[in-house]
Image (spheres, grey):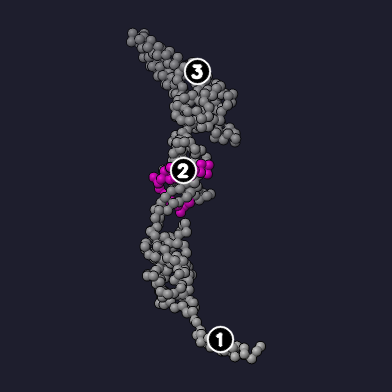
Amino acid sequence: MTSRSLPFLAASLALLLAAACSRAPVHDESPDPAVKGDRVVFPANSPQRAAIAVAVAERHGAEIHHLSGRVVWDEDATVRIYAPVAGRVVSIAATLGDRIEADAPLVRLASPDFGQAQADARKAAADLLLAQRTFARTKDLFEHGALARKDLEAAEDAHAAAQAEQQRAMARLKLYGAADGDVDGLFTLRSPIAGTLVEKNVNPGQEVRPDQQLANASQLFAPLCIVSDPAHLRVLIDSPERELAALHPGIAITIRSAAVADRSFNGVIDGISDALDATTHMVTVRGRVENPDRLLKAEMFVTVEFTAMGAPGVDVPVKAVFIKGDRHFVYVEESPGAYVRHEVEIGADHDGKILVRSGLTAGQRVAAEGALMLEEVRTNPGGSE
């Protein structure tokens, strides 16, 4: 290094030292918020205000409830047909899915029991005819003094007995849905209503009895035929106790099934059971559902939706509510940067919101983000930085 460069280096060092000494220390101080009781106010230039997001408390409206249910035949349009007599199946006049008119034949049975009923009716009719003739002849003889009154009374009594027996025999045939005719022992099982044959548990040659539903476990209570209207079904809904306040006959319901995911079906509630199931502690709610395209099937599990007016109150975001001990609070924005803590009573949460039953009114603005930060500032103003 030459002697000439020494003065230049000394001058440079002096300038650097002077510049360093002339710089004053910089302090990044944020203005402190003002805290008074439950009220927190941030100055306009406070960076903490950016951490707070507000939301408007909305009036709590209708609620959508979801329950589980099961589709069944409409009992008002369904008949389960059993054989009223014992016999052997001779022929079957309908197949599954057939449209059935009222009084249409379904199954024909060769039945000794029915044959006996036919024979009893024919014999009763013959006995009545004989009793009528005997009574008429006895009356004529009595009027001419050829017979005593006791003979007339005996003939009259026999006629009345024969008439009663004939009426009993004919009434028995009518209960079977048959009229007086030849004694052939062939009984025709008919449908009492119009509809569709939706179930058939009978085969040609099968022996049936009136007590068939109790004959064996595999056919316990199984009818020979079921005629119903698949376009009109019922839904049995399992409802917990807490839903009963929102349920009553006449409420519109929407039925959805996983088997028909792209469709919904309209219905209405028409009855609520008076007792809870002892095992599940559920209440059975009955509803009607229209099924014009026959997409819903009996015994199908479904989801039932209905809309009911919610409890009085307002909805706010769940994050707006915080808990201290056993009490719930929110921070309400009085003006930009000014927040006041309010104690509230809450209800159920739904879809990211929570019901506030009291302590807020619709239209108030609450801190949806930053409520816990506000609580920290209120309880520890000096440590809020």
Residue 271 x, y percent position in the rendering: 42, 44
What's the residue at 39%, 60% (across, down)? 58
What's the residue at 41%, 51% (across, down)? 308
> Split into 4 quadrants, where in the image is the N terminus?
bottom right
Q: Position of 262 compared to 216: left or right?
A: left
Q: Nearer the viewer, residue 23 or 86?
A: 23
Residues in magenta, as a range: 240-269
What residue sits right under mark 2 in the picture?
Answer: 264
SS for callout 2: strand
Residue 3 x, y percent position in the rendering: 64, 91
Residue 368 x, y percent position in the rendering: 45, 65
What's the residue at 49%, 19% (across, down)? 118
Residue at the extreme left of the image, as rendered: 143
The numbered mark, 3 or 1, whose residue comes first in the sequence reads 1
Q: CA distance from mark 1 to mark 2?
A: 82 Å
Q: Nearer the viewer, residue 292 or 222?
A: 292
Q: CA distance from mark 3 to mark 2?
A: 57 Å
Q: Nearer the viewer, residue 268 or 247?
A: 268
